[in-house]
Amino acid sequence: MRKYLVLYSQAHDSFRLPELTSIAELHGFGHTMKVTLPDDLPDGGREASTLDDSKPRTPRPFVIVELESEDQARLLAQRCILIKAIYELWAHAPSYSLLHERNQTPEARALWAPFKSTPFRMHVTAIHHAFPEGRVRQVIQSFAYMNYEHISLDNPGVVLFVCEEYELRIGMRNKSEGDGEFMQVYFGRLVTEGTARQLITKFDVKKRAYYGNTSMEAEMSLLMANQAQSSPGKLIYDPFTGTGSMLYTCAFFGALVFGSDIDGRQMRGKDTSSLGVIRSASQYGVANRILDCATFDITFNPWRRGGIFDAIVTDPPYGVRAGAKRIGSSIVGKPLSDVPRIVDSGIAAHTKSTYIPPMRPYEMSDLTKDLIEFARYMLKPGGRLVFFLPTVTEDYSELDVPECDGMRLVGNSIQDFGKWARRLITIEKTTTDNLEAHAPTFEDRAWRKREERAGLEPTDSIMHSDGKEEHVPAHRDFREKYFQGFRKEDSDVS
């Protein structure tokens, strides 16, 4: 096992490890890979003098991984969206004197000695800091004891890497202020640059043939595909397809995909000559991997059996741009009629291609529970459910992610927008029990509650049949809370 330094883009820090471990597991070495965060190194922690307890700590853009081979490092860099580069780590320390001492141990020499005759270039850089003129040369000369023979700036056979990591300092200051007061300095060899980040430009929504105001941004849809471990031979489903963002990225990584939505207009678009989702899929060269797109409500789905999909990847509508809907009367206490509505010379309304069924709101906490139970039924053992969950930042609790027998939480990453956030939840199916026993019922709990208390004051809690109070998640009635500015007032679910 050798140590490698993974350099990340300085964004979406809570998504890094879930993506890294997901891709390592996809390629079969997740169980052998060991991950160490810089703060967990024996001398890699932040000095107390550099910290201001009144400010949140900036996530550090490195992790150290132990891998069996360089090929494994290349696999990670080719697939992980957030990785900028991976280096073989030869030494690291909180000072140059200690770094050089460690770099001259027999173990370290065994790593760098084979490259002594290889043309090289040394890249000296820093995180959250700018080197003053002249010190770069000083740093390079401090490694003279290695006796590397041939410098080649244009065509090096090996690129050596020296990086000083500083604490982020906010406010106006001289760009070289605090020079040399780094937390850690790393030294090693470039193995590979991250190539997957180029896909963010490739899948840029603004360059897409067909998109809408609810289309998921490229970076997030790629991260979701990685969390789902999309790859050739897998079948992946998006039950809230919309304009198809998750279909494209999952298909790009080789999976066959199927999409559905309660409103077919989202998938079709206004151009009736071709399906909007297929136009964009053709743009990315993955149209042949989209099995089909169908219009139906997930709570009245046509699936005749479970255990079909390797992953379910979706972004349920939660009300910021569009609210979730399910089939049903929007009038409290009025059930749907069993008699077809007749229009236009005796034609049943539901047989027309332009038909939109009657719909009512699908409350977010109900949808979340239903989605997890639906995934338990529809996924193969080991399959994954990947979805975004909106949360109210101040009120969020770990209990907000519903627990479900036979399902295990493996990822919970946050994208923070201030008063609210959305969390990328990844849940893996662990059960192999009888599928029919886990068929979801899609009980409309929120609507039943409306009917039960019609004309009464709203309550703040839901009671179990045994009289115990049920946890009320922060995302309950999220749409109403969002448009009320998340004021601390009791919100009616009507």
Image: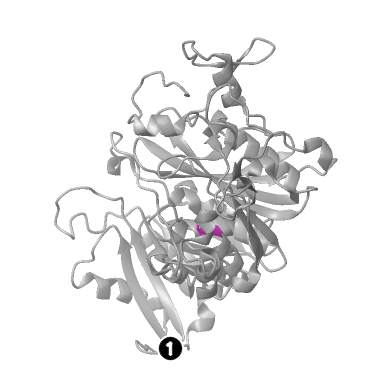
Q: Please state the horizontal and vertical placement of residue 113, each as a whole percent of the image.
A: 51, 79
The 10 Å Cα crowd at callout 1, few under 14, some 14 to 19, many 20 or more, is some
> In the image, is residue 169 part of the stretch drawn in magenta?
no
Q: Please state the horizontal and vertical placement of residue 60, each as a whole percent of the image.
A: 40, 52
At label 1, the amino acid type is Pro
What quarter of the picture does the N terminus occupy? Answer: bottom right
Q: Please state the horizontal and vertical placement of residue 181, each as a whole percent of the image.
A: 27, 54
Decide whether the magenta segment is chiefly helix, strand or loop.
loop
Count of all numbered marks drawn on residues in the image:
1
- Magenta residues, as a range? 242-246
Q: Residue at x 26, y 59 (%)?
A: 129
115 to 330, vertically: above or below = below
Quarter occupied by residue 432: top right
Quarter occupied by residue 419: top left
Q: How is the image coloured?
A: one colour
251 to 314, vertically: above or below = below
Q: Residue at x 44, y 21 (%)?
A: 492
Residue 246 in sight in this render: yes
Q: Which residue is mark 1?
A: 119
Q: Residue furthest right?
A: 434
Q: Residue at x 61, y 25 (%)?
A: 445
Q: Nearer the viewer, residue 234 or 453?
A: 453
